[in-house]
Each structure stands twice: as structure tokens, then as C-alpha cells.
Amino acid sequence: MTTDGVYVLPDRILRGALGALLILGFVACTESVTGTLGCPQLCGDQSATLRDTTLTGVVTTDSVLTGYPEFGESRDFTLISQGDTADVRVVIRFDTLPNTFRHPNASVDSAVTRVDSARIFFVVDTTIGRPTAPVTIDAFDVDTTAADTLRSALVPLFRPDRLIGSRTYEVAEIRDTLPLPISNAVVLAKATAGARLRVGLRVRSTGTVRLKISGSAYSPRLTYRVTPDTLVSRDTVLLQSFTPKDDPIATVYALYPIVVAGALPVPASNVLAVGGVGGARSYLRFDIPPILLDSVQVVRASLLLNQIPSRVAASSADTTALVVDPILAGERITDVRTILNFAGSGSVIGVDSVRLVPKDAGLRSVELVNLFRAWRGVGSDNSIRAIVLRAKQEASSSAELDFVSSEGAEALRPKLRITYVPRRGFGLP
């Protein structure tokens, strides 16, 4: 899921500044159209009649990009087993294992000659759903001299002769921290040889199962005892990765996912896709008449999207949250993937998510009025009028939302429906 990007430091700094401007623009003045008593000294006369307009052809550019979240953006990954529809596994790396220990009553180190009770501990996040049947997690030795960041090199290593641990958990056991026992002999051999331990995790059950490992809340770790003497504490080994060699992001590979099945390609140009195992996001840029931002008071702004049944049959009945984030990039950034690196948070300025069911079809409305107010405050020179649509369950579910793009049937293309009041001056009435 790695993606080439462009690192532009000034724009990353600018992103924070623009984010602050968006927030300030949002809170500057909250207008009401119920009368002229709300804020008569600061806001325009609001007694005028509400007017509606629907803008067609307002989306000048829309694109679908996959592979999100990008490599290194997240430490939370979901193990998924859903037949041929989705298969996601996780690799964890312990590239340094201690081969000596010191007894509290000794003055010199002793060599590690035994290992007992070796376990990998990790935290699971059940907010995405709790399994309804027992779940088995298998651990495999996936260390290799091949290019082990490539899916093609890693997937064949998930085979019986490399199995180093397995446990089945009852539903009631799947909460908070899970211990996964692994082979004491393997850990001992790796430690004494000065070798690295790299473990691939695979989940399975009688039906579809998703198990989210929360690496941001609690970094997975390996623990074991090197002596039966209880005066000597258990060894605890934290995640560590030293390869790719001389790569500044080598540490990111200490915990990362492998999408074995389910990552769909970018859809046809007449479809906008959001979500799925492949992490699809849709970028939309608007050409909004300046009068709607500068000269009238917008009281409602709705993005109208025509949803079509998902191209993913499995999980199509799962409710999925559609999230809208504003783009904080300026005009000088033109590469779409780079632009998406400058997405802010829609929730910060009051743009709510919308819950949809992938198998459904029909007209959907996404409210953007607070974004319009933010755009008015920040100005067109500082931020293009664009958004990115993503799924809250991105890469954690095979569920994908699909919509008609600006290249679809004309009647079904994205539109903006605006309700506004003409500004009639400022000051006391």
C-alpha cells in the first residue's frame, strides 16, 4: 500500500495555518434567517426571502485514488477473513532479541539458554464490531532474505511448515488485550543466533471476521521467561524494524498490513468509489460562482450524489459512514495525490458524516453549509474549493460506497443545491 509522494515542507506548514483559518472563518459569525434580531450590528439584513438554486456542472474535476490510509499514516490495522472477497493479514517485526540476561544477584550477564511462555500481546479494538463466533489467530515465521516488503514475497510464507503459533479465542475472550502463544523453540533459536523474529498474523473463523489491532493505543510486544527463577523478570521485546536498509521509513515496517485479496482497482471513470479494503477516496473540485461566497448569505449547501449499488457484493448491507474532508491546498499544487495529503478534518468545521448502505441506490444529500462559511472566511487564494470523500471504516471493511461521477449520465452527475439570502447591507437597520 506504499505510494510515491512529493514532500513539500512549506505546504505542510501552510496546511496547519489554513486549517486555523478555516476554523476562524467558521466561528466568525453565525447567521440566522428567522429575523433581523440575531446580530443586527454585525450581520447583513436577514429578512429577505430564501432563494434556491441548483448548480449543475459545478464539479470540474473528480478522481478516485486507492491505497489509503497511506503507508505510515496509521498504526491500527484490521485482520480480515472474508473468503475471496477480502483477506488482510498483518506483519509484526522484532528485529532485535536479547541473547543475555542478568540475575539480580549476579555481577555479569548470563547467556540465554532457554525460553518459556513466549507470547505476543496486542490490543484489539471492538468498536468496529465484535465477532459472533470463535476466532482463530495463526502466527507464521515470515522472515526471509527476499524483498520482504512485497506482497508476492510474503504471502507464500503463510504455510504450515512456518506456523509458529495458533490460538482459538471464544467470543467472550475477545476484548482488550489478547495473548497469542508462539513457539518457545523458535524464539530461543532466533535469540541465540542473533536473528530477527518477524511474525505474520492471519485470522480465520467459520464466517466473516474482522479483528482490528490497535497499534496506536498499545504497541504489540513479545514477552517470555529465560529462567524459572522468579527474581528474573520476563523479557519484553518491543516492535523494531531495521529494513529496508538506509530507508528513513524502515521503522514503519515494524507493523504493517498485507492485502492478500479484496483490493479493487480504480473503477471506471463514470464511478466514484469510497472505502473498501483497497482504501478508495474520491476527490471533487468545484467551480463555485464567487457571488455565492462573497455576496450572499448561504443558509444551506447540499452536495447531491447519485448512489449506485456497490461493486462489492459482500458486506454491501453493512452501514458505512461517508466522511467529507476539506482540501487545504492552494492553487500551485496540481498533483491530485499530493493534494489529498493536504486534507483537513471536516468534523472540525462542523461537516457531519453521512451513514449509507453500499447496496442501496438513489439520490443522497451531503450537507456542506459550514464548509461554505469556512471558504468565505479563508478566501480563494489560500484554498481551492475541493473536498475528499472517504469512509470512516477505511481499509477496515470490504464495504465500498459507489456514486455516479461527473462523467456519468448527465442527469445523475454530482450537483450542488444552494439555499441563500441576498445580503442587503450591514449595520443597524
Image (spheres, grey):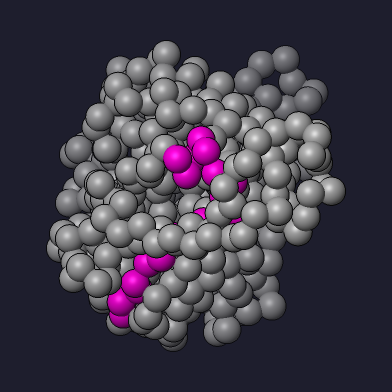
Q: Quadrant of residue 374?
A: top right
Residue in the foreground of this view, choosing between 22 and 135: 22
Residue extending farthest to the right is: 37
> On the rendered image, what quadrant is the C terminus found in?
top right
Residue for point 41% across, 58% down: 416
Answer yes or no: is residue 406 visible. yes
Instruction: Name the main secondary structure of what is drawn in magenta.
Output: strand
Q: Report the side of 23 relative to 267 (left or right).
A: right
Q: Is residue 202 visible?
A: no
Near-viewer residue (394 or 103):
394
**Residue 159 belongs to magenta span:** no
* Location of residue 172 in the rendering, given as x and y in whole percent from the top left corner: 69, 78
Location of residue 129 with respect to 329 vertically, above or below: below
Residue at 27% across, 37% down:
336
Rendered location of residue 98, percent (x, y):
53, 29
Q: In the rendered image of this protein, does residue 254 appear above or below residue 402?
A: above
> Where residue 91 sits in the image (x, y, percent)?
39, 49
Q: Which residues are magenta?
A: 291-309
Toward the viewer: 352 or 232?
A: 352
